Amino acid sequence: MTLAIFDLDNTLLAGDSDHAWGQFLIDQGLVDANIVKTANDTFYADYLAGKLDIDRYLRFSLSFLAGKPLDELASLHQRFMATTIEPMIGQKSLALLDQHRQRGDTLMIITATNRFVTGPIAKRLNVSHLIACDAQIVDNQYTGLPTGIPSYQEGKVIRLQTWLDEHNQSLDGAWFYSDSRNDLPLLRQVDNPVAVDPDETLEAQAHLHGWPIISLRG
């Protein structure tokens, strides 16, 4: 089995689903616009700079889910998919996924965005394996707290290794596509790292190591 692993935000998607979810909640009038926009934009800037405090961010991003009925959240996410995520899904991303699918590769998305946001997106992209940051659920309700090791920076390597061990698989011949400096730890682990519309730091590393650079935009 050859793994084809994909980052999600700003890689397969032409945008960041996590940041967009916060803006969606603002647009729907479901959160305090001033407080959430300031925090959302600050955390996103920290992520782009490679200095995000992932635990603080997860507690912020998951707080809206706490105590709400799951069917209500599912309905809200359906609107989010239709209005916000669908326009982020481009034909080049779909074609790349299909290219690996036709080769017989096993497709996986690994993302620092939480599973509530990304689970339906992975399903829409027909990718059955998803590693994402997990939200705690107690008595069939979200608590608003994260659980487990966040799949962020080195955490992606740890979470992926756990998955490999559980499935008796390896990274032999694996591909990993990403746009972000935050994914350098995992990019260095695979045989076929690919930079996708990369940030400046990743672009420099790709040139240094001779990694392919591609674009999925347009």
Image (cartoon, rainbow, N blue to C red):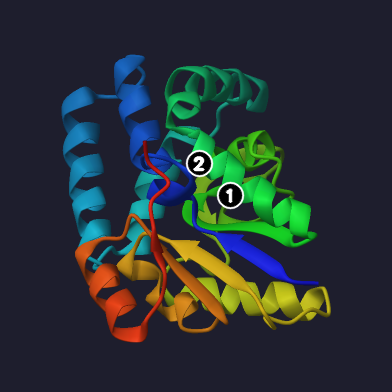
Quarter of image, res 32: top left
- Residue 32 lies, with reference to residue 56, above or below; the image says above
The 10 Å Cα crowd at callout 2, few under 14, some 14 to 19, many 20 or more, is some
Q: Are there few (<14), some (14-19), or many (20+) residues within 10 Å of tag 1?
A: few
Residue hosting label 2: 92
Marker disc for residue 72? none
Q: Percent from the top left, x then y, of residue 204?
A: 23, 75
Q: Quadrant of the N terminus?
A: bottom right
Secondary structure under tag 2 reads helix
> Which residue appears at 59% of the width and 37% of the height?
121
Q: Which residue position is annotated with label 1?
A: 96
**Residue at left offset 24%, top offset 51%:** 43
- Residue 84 position in % (x across, y down): 43, 24
Give the image location of residue 70, x and y in percent. Answer: 65, 28
Q: Quadrant of residue 173?
A: bottom right
Residue 6 lies, with reference to residue 89, above or below; the image says below
- Image quarter (top left, top right, bottom left or bottom right) of the C terminus: top left
Asked whether disc 2 touches disc 1, contact meaning CB atoms under 8 Å apart, the reply is: yes
Q: Is residue 112 left or right of residue 70?
A: left
- For the point 82% across and 73% down, the residue is 167
Query: Percent x, y for residue 197?
Result: 33, 54
Left or right of 18 on screen, residue 126 = right
